[in-house]
Amino acid sequence: MKTTKEDNISKAIKNVISELMNRVMNKVLIQDPFIKEKHHSAKPLYAALVPDEIFKGSHFERRFVTPFGGVWEKLAKVVATEAHGNCMMGHTITGTVGSESLRRIQEVLNKLEHKEKGKERINPDWKREMAYIKNGGGELISTSVVCDIFIESDKTGKKYAFELKGPLPNSDQTKVSKEKIFKLLAMEPQKVDFAFYALPYNPYGKKEDYAWSFPLRWFDMKKDESVLIGNEFWNLIGGTGTYDMFVKEINTLGKEYKEQIYREFLGIDPLEGSNDGMLK
């Protein structure tokens, strides 16, 4: 049986997704529907060559993507707020970092990005890199970092910062995130207790199978303690079992909205296998 906290987390997840999806459905069904005649008039060549349903799908996609920007952060915020009491998105943390530590941060990143002539490419090693940076010291310089998610926990008394990226992030995003985490953890005095690079979902299943190449240049995605993927992230911010609740709520809503989209937007019955894209 669910506790009050677990029930509240489930409701919070459902509310975020429902609000966004209802906004999308109102847009594509009421405010800005696909009008076949308008499409034919504006793009007669396209209409002559390609079925209307293809462009009807792209019409929906364009109106879906914008409201869902930042959805991972919105979900994380409502979950963490229920579990920890305080959570902010886009929070700025200002502190001081030693000048030599700052130089070493750039050195580490440059060596990961550029292979030295005549040498093997350096592989990321979080513990070694972090120890090297912290030992740098030097004159303290004011430094600010904007983190995607910041939790100041009523439950643990700790402060957590997260760089939260999509399941398949690009290389530039990951480099910026690693630099931010380095700076956060090198601040003197300490401003956060923990800082993580987090991916909310793992399309490869198990963490040891994660194989998207771009972040692998910057992190050992399987071993670095600073990396959280899928269930590790959700269970940390929401408590044990949060990831399972997250998956269950998303899949339940997915079935409902897919049927509505088929019947009310596309005007057809749901196709066989329409629920194959469920989260796992």
Image: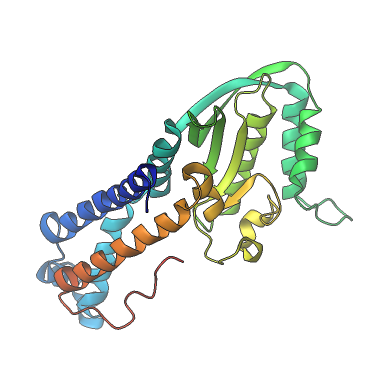
Q: Nearer the viewer, residue 57 or 202?
A: 202
Residue 128 position, x and y percent, is 80, 41
Residue in view at x 75 percent, y 30 percent: 103
Q: Is residue 149 left or right of residue 103?
A: left
Q: Is residue 251 left or right of residue 173?
A: left
Residue in view at x 22 percent, y 71 percent: 259
Q: Is residue 140 above or below residue 113?
A: above
Q: How many marks?
A: 0
Q: Is residue 44 above or below residue 24?
A: below
Viewer can see residue 176? no
Q: Nearer the viewer, residue 51 or 194?
A: 194
Residue 52 position, x and y percent, is 20, 76
Applied colour scheme: rainbow
Q: Nearer the viewer, residue 236 or 48?
A: 236
Residue 75 position, x and y percent, is 39, 46
Q: Is residue 99 left or right of residue 266?
A: right
In the rendered image, the quadrant that contains the N terminus is bottom left
Which image quadrant is residue 127 in? top right
Q: Residue furthest right?
A: 118
Residue 164 position, x and y percent, is 51, 45
Q: Is residue 168 left or right of residue 140?
A: left
Q: Residue furthest front?
A: 1
Viewer can see residue 125? yes
Q: Nearer the viewer, residue 243 or 165?
A: 243
Q: Residue furthest top?
A: 139
Q: Is residue 101 above or below residue 203?
A: above
Residue in view at x 56 percent, y 66 percent: 205
Residue in view at x 63 percent, y 48 percent: 227
